[in-house]
Amino acid sequence: MADYNTIRAGQVGVRTTQIDAGLRTHMNKVYGTMSVGMLMTALVAWAFGSNDALLSIFRDPITLSPNLLGWAAMFAPLIMVFAFGAAVNRLSAAGAQLFFYAFAAVMGLSLSWIFKAFTGVSIAQTFLITAISFAGLSLWGYTTKKDISGWGSFLIMGVIGLLVASIVNIFLGSPAIMFAISILGVLIFAGLTAYDTQKIKTDYIQHAQSMDSEWLAKSAIMGALNLYLDFINLFMFLLQFLGNRE
């Protein structure tokens, strides 16, 4: 009996070690894919935002008012996120990754105006603060023993509320509403960063035994998309507080 228990414990230990190693690889792919997407967004945003001729395709370079293409670029990322969620099961892993990078490029177009509205130094400073905050929140979500899965429904409701309020304020243009939206946005996406990180980890552990390489690849891309959106939104809401306008 002792020998059997020893062998059984050894087998469990081997499986645990394999899952731990696989989880590290999985998380590295999530963060790596997210980082490439962030870089693509930054390059596209800077290329269009720092060139009046390119920016004028979407917005007036002086007033920054969007034209028809500007409105399309503004709402295109939202439409693409819903389309990606609906189509991901029918896409291959390579197709899902290509879609994510296309989405990141379109997001760059929609954010290009910030390089005209804010100073480069304040953008860089806000990005650094966001990166440090995001890293801390994501690390906490990964390492905490507390189950925060219950946060999900409240945070998603908060995101929907933010989206509706932001659309309404496009037409109202109220600084007070924008200030309130920014405060709530920072809090909601800070929570989502920790929540999404823990969810990526738990989803992997739950499916690790099957070792479905196609599922794991697409799961990593979906995880990268979720964390990418958390980072971008956290950055944009912080920029409303920390950014110095041109």
Image: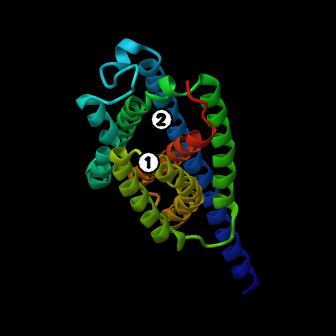
Q: Is residue 12 left or right of residue 109?
A: right
246 or 10, which lies in front?
Answer: 246
Type of residue at label 2? Gly
- What residue is rendered at 58% in x and 49% in y? 27
Examine the rendered structure and indicate whether residue 116 appears above or below residue 25. Answer: above
Callout 1, which amino acid?
A: Ser
* Residue 148 horizontal/vertical position (percent): 59, 70
Q: Residue at x 72, y 87 (%)?
A: 1
Q: Which mark is residue 37?
A: 2
Visible residue check, residue 92: no
Residue assigned mark 1:
174
Q: Is residue 235 above or below residue 245?
A: below
Q: Which mark is residue 148?
A: none
Return the x and y of residue 38 as percentages of the image width and height. Answer: 51, 34
Q: CA distance from mark 1 to mark 2?
A: 32 Å
- In the rendered image, the vertical position of residue 47 relative to residue 101, given as above or below: above
Query: Given this view, does label 1 or label 2 mark the residue nearer the observer?
Result: 1
Q: In the rendered view of the protein, which quadrant contains the C terminus? A: top right
Dot 1 falls on a residue whose secondary structure is loop
SS label for mark 2: helix
Instruction: State which tag comes first along the sequence, 1 or 2.
Output: 2
Task: State whether residue 9 is above or below residue 198.
Answer: below
